[in-house]
Image: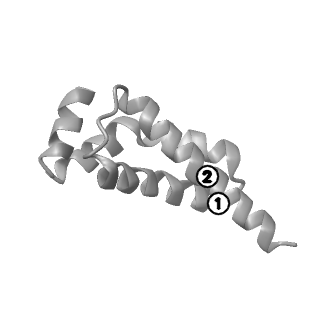
Amino acid sequence: MEDEQIVELSFRRDGTAVKEMQDKYGRLCMEIAGRILPDPRDAEECASDAFLRAWNSIPPEHPRSLKAYLARIARNLALDRYDYNSASRR
């Protein structure tokens, strides 16, 4: 499915959008989070959270590039998790 169609499903609040995002960009989000987080379970959780975060932010956001949008969300979530894990070890 094309990105614009997935974004349109999100605007219509059709839950299929989340599944389509996961199918199309799940591996990408896992790879991004996995490069930041040493624990694969944390990376998987960040990837899943990225789709939920996108679902909750579309609308009102209308990303021009869904791939870049999801990648940025996954990266930011992984960095936040990394910072939290590092701070809790101190």
Apparent side of residue 9 relative to residue 41 in the rendered image (left or right): left
- Bin the neighbour count of mark 2 within 10 Å (Cα to Cα): few under 14, some 14-19, many 20 and up: many
Apparent side of residue 19 relative to residue 35 in the rendered image (left or right): left
Quickly name the residue at label 2. 78
Callout 2 amino acid: Ala
The percent position of residue 85, horizontal first and vertical second, equals: 73, 66
The percent position of residue 4, horizontal first and vertical second, equals: 22, 28
Q: Is residue 76 above or below residue 6?
A: below
Residue at 34% across / 33% down in the picture?
63
Residue at 64% across / 57% down in the picture?
80
Q: Quadrant of residue 24?
A: top left
Identify the residue at the far front of this view. Answer: 60
Camera-side residue: 42 or 7?
7
- Bin the neighbour count of mark 1 within 10 Å (Cα to Cα): few under 14, some 14-19, many 20 and up: some
Callout 1 amino acid: Arg
The percent position of residue 59, horizontal first and vertical second, equals: 25, 46
Residue contact at pointers 2 and 1, CB within 8 angstroms: yes
Quickly name the residue at label 1. 81
What secondary structure is marked by label 1?
helix
Q: Is residue 1 visible?
A: no
